[in-house]
Structure formats: structure tokens, C-alpha cells
Image (cartoon, rainbow, N blue to C red):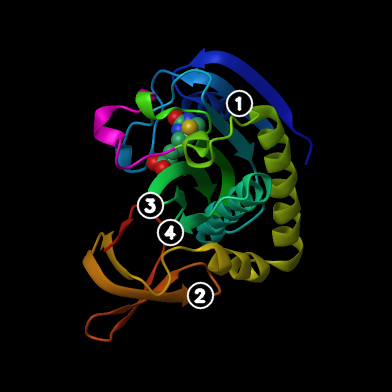
Amino acid sequence: MGLKIKYLQEVDSTQTMAAEMVKKGEEEGTVIIAEQQTDGRGRLGRKWFSPPGTGIWMSMILKPQIPLQFIHQLTLLISVAICRVIKRMLDVDVGIKWPNDLYINGKKVCGILLESSAEDERVKHVIAGVGISVNLLQKDIPEDLKDKMTSLCIETGIKCNREELLISLFKEWEELYMLYLSEGFAPIRILWEALSICLHCPIQVHTHQGIVKGKAYGMDEMGALMIRDEEGKEHKIYSGDVSLTLV
Ligand code: BTN
């Protein structure tokens, strides 16, 4: 997949901009990257803190030929790709908190937002938004986020070259995407399980049906998190609009 990179100093949200471009017929492989977002968006209607020059704020347009029910597998794939690159480049203990957040030392360092459209139960387009806090300093983190978020620089003491990180990220992402298209989700699932920080720990998941408390014991072949609740009942939960807390 050839990439077409559009680099901007400032935008409200790379995600919103990518969506507008898709409406005008933009092809797969376009990536919008911004130095700063003035209205960055997170999952579940949250805001995404995206100050200038400190992070990777980007959205990639994808048009995978897959059924809609497989779409959450792409999020898992992207989180695996980012996690592997950060681990390799910075030798830091980063892990995936289901469904798609990356954590270091109990604080979030990266979030992924997948937005898509479908027709006849098949995916038409996906906009994969990625926010990685790279060189943010502790003093720059807003008070209300101080105990929740961190950056690669805070955790490693290394000012990271964002271009190098991006290049490695695109390469890893593409390799895993090709693997996924040729071999399906099975190899991604194995990689995800090895990087997960929420397997076998007490967790609480907020779903549309209510709260499930228990322990996750694996991921099924479709990408659902398998949880055994406190009564021993088994649940399969897909990412959708859910949130998970480590308790
Ligand atoms: C989350 O964890 O809530 C997802 C955060 C996704 C943030 C990225 S930054 C680039 C892209 N543009 C946005 O407005 N959001 C995503």
C-alpha cells in the first residue's frame, strides 16, 4: 500500500479532516499528520490533548475489503504494530490495555480511534486515528490528566525523533496488515495476547448491557475479549463503545 502523506502545522482534528477527504473520494493510503490539533477527538466523545510539536497526531485512510464484523481486528492490529515499534525503539515496558490503549507504568501514552462506514455489511472505508504522546514533558500535562497520561520522553528520559518513529510505525503497520490480509487474524491475536496488560488481572468492563467484573483470560479467534466474571460466567466482549478499568 503506497502512502500519501499530508503534513499540516495545525488542524482541528486530523480525523475530521480525513473524513471530509473521504467524502470527496480520497483513496486508501492517505495519511494526515498535524503538529497540533485544536479539537483532537478521543474515543467515547472525549477530547484528545494534542499540543504542538510533542506528539504524533495522525489519521490514515484505509479501504480494506473485509466484512464489517472484522473491523475491530484492525484496531487490535494497529495497537500491536505501535506497541512493537515503541518496545523495539525505546526498550520500554509498554503494553496494550484492551481494546486499544497503550500504557507505560500505569499511564496512557497512546490511543487509537477507528471510525468507519459500511455498505451491505462490508467495510467501505476506515479512518484510523492514532495519538502518541512522544515528547510531552510532565510540566506540560494538564492537572486533570497528570495521573492518567504520560509520554515516551517522560518514561524513558529520551527525546524521541518523531520522524524515525513514524517511519518504523508505517513499516510495521504495513507488514502486519499484509500478514493479516494473507493469514487472517490468528497471528495478530497471538502477538496481541503477548503484549496485553489486562489478561489474568481483575478488570471491570462497561458495556451497553452493564458492568462486567471479572478476569480476562484470552482473546477469541474473532478478536473478542473473553472474560470470566465473579460468578464464573463467561462473556465475550467486542471493543465498540466499551471501556475497561484495571481494578
Ligand atoms: C482514545 O484513546 O480516546 C483515542 C485517541 C485518538 C487520538 C487521535 S490523534 C489523531 C486523530 N485525530 C483525532 O482527533 N483523534 C485521533
Amino acid type of the residue tagged 2 in the rendering: Asp
Q: Which mark is residue 220?
A: 2
Q: Earlier in the sequence, mark 2 or mark 3?
A: 3
User: With respect to residue 29, does 122 lie above or below?
Assistant: below
User: Which residue is drawn at the image coordinates 73% and 35% (left, top)?
Assistant: 167
Is residue 115 in sight in this rendering? yes
User: With respect to residue 188, does 13 lie above or below?
Assistant: above
Image quarter (top left, top right, bottom left or bottom right) of the N terminus: top right
Is residue 26 in sight in this rendering? no
Q: Which mark is residue 106?
A: 3
Is 145 contained in the magenta span? yes
Name the quadrant where ligand 1 sits: top left
Q: Are marks 2 and 3 in contact (CB under 8 Å)?
A: no
Q: Nearer the viewer, mark 1 or mark 4?
A: 4
Task: Please tell me how crowded label 4 is: few (under 14), some (14-19), or many (20+) other residues with Cα within 10 Å.
Answer: many
Judged left or right of residue 114, residue 7 is: right
Residue 179 x, y percent position in the rendering: 74, 60
Q: Is mark 2 within 8 Å of ligand 1?
A: no
Tell me where residue 239 sits by quadrant.
bottom left
User: With respect to residue 200, does 76 lie above or below?
Assistant: above
Q: Which residues are magenta?
A: 140-150
Q: Which residue is mark 1?
A: 32
Question: Could you tell me how far apart the alpha carbons at marks 1 and 2 are, in whole angstroms?
Answer: 33 Å
Q: Which residue is mark 4?
A: 98
